[in-house]
Image (cartoon, helix red, strand yellow):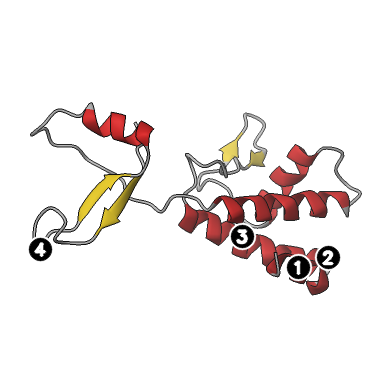
Amino acid sequence: MTAFVRKIKAGTVSPDVPVLVADDGESEKKIIACREGARYAIQVRRARNIKHHRLVFVMLADMFANQENYTSPETYRAAVKIAVGWVHDEPIISEDGSVSWAVKPLDFWHCGEDDFADFHTRLTAYAGEQFGWDFVERYESI
């Protein structure tokens, strides 16, 4: 279950305790469904910035359009992820001994904003090496 919450300042409910409240209607329903008094473990991460997400994918699309080695955007994105080290820690070793890497996902549910910012930093460095810094600077002003 994923619910989006927002931290509000102390004093809203109790004088010294900051509170997390549901950020949207769907999240509120999920929180209401939790049993009162029950203990829940949560994983805290920043929600993704949609503008940042779109910027990275526009940059990837332009990178794909400016290369000649790959015929599909999906294959190119996977190659870029491997090139920048955006792969799972454990390699995949086949029966014949060949090694491959599984790329990490970039979707909203599997990649928080902090990790996505790390990918963006790696992507920017890679794009600068491959296409020149003039190419990269176009995306800093968006």
Mark 4, Cα crowd under 10 Å, few <14 / some 14-19 / many 20+, is few
Whether residues under marks 4 and 1 lie with C-beta atoms below 8 angstroms apart, the answer is no
- Judged by depth in the image, the label closer to the viewer, 2 or 4, is 4
In this figure, which residue is indicated by the disc labeled 1? Answer: 136
Left or right: 140 as drawn, with respect to 36: right
- What amino acid is at disc 4? Asp
In this figure, which residue is indicated by the disc labeled 3? Answer: 120
Using the image as rendered, state which of residue 5 and residue 60 is in the foreground. Answer: 5
- Whole-number angstrom distance, CA of label 3 to CA of label 4: 37 Å
| Between discs 2 and 4, the one toward the N terminus | 4
In the picture, residue 104 is in which quadrant? top right
In this figure, which residue is indicated by the disc labeled 4? Answer: 16
Residue visible at 77% across and 45% down in the picture = 76
Mark 1, Cα crowd under 10 Å, few <14 / some 14-19 / many 20+, is some
Q: How many discs mark residues in the rendered view? A: 4
Mark 3, Cα crowd under 10 Å, few <14 / some 14-19 / many 20+, is some
| Between discs 3 and 2, the one toward the N terminus | 3
In this figure, which residue is indicated by the disc labeled 2? Answer: 131
- As helix, strand or loop, the secondary structure at mark 3 comes to helix
In the picture, residue 128 is in which quadrant? bottom right
